[in-house]
Amino acid sequence: MTYFYSTITASQGDSSVPEETRKLWEHIVQKKNWRITELPNGYFQAEYQRDNKWIDVTRRETVKACERAIDASIAHYQKRLDFLKGPVVVKTFE
């Protein structure tokens, strides 16, 4: 499984992600901003659109594998966005 990684990341407990990075993540999690193209060698490439420019992310042997990579990337960045909302309480004690 391949993910697109940005050069700026958030560490555990740090929600001070730059606004530009947060906007990029919000853009990436929308599947309408993605496409799959077929390359001359027969592989398929996942790309997302940013500022009217297509950014290539990953290459796969099949369309299904490429779409799974897109879905995994979307899930990954959705988790990062959820992290920015603050910690998730899983258990409290009295």
Image (cartoon, rainbow, N blue to C red):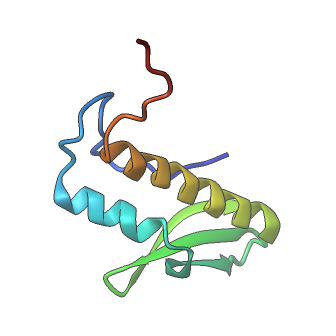
Q: Please identify the quadrant where the C terminus is shown.
A: top left
Nearest the camera: 63 or 16? 16
Q: Nearer the viewer, residue 87 or 12?
A: 87
Depth check, front residue: 35 or 40: 35
Q: Quadrant of residue 47?
A: bottom right
Identify the residue shown where x is 43% and y is 30%.
Answer: 89
The answer to whether 20 appears left or right of 48 in the picture is left
The reply to whether residue 2 is in sight is: yes
Q: Is residue 93 above or below residue 68?
A: above
Q: Residue at x 71, y 71 (%)?
A: 44
Q: Against 34, is 83 above or below?
A: above
Residue 24, quarter of the rendered image? bottom left
In which quadrant is the N terminus drawn?
Answer: top right
- The image position of residue 61, as x and y in percent, is 79, 62
Q: Nearer the viewer, residue 19 or 84?
A: 84
Is residue 62 at all visible to an observer of this figure? no
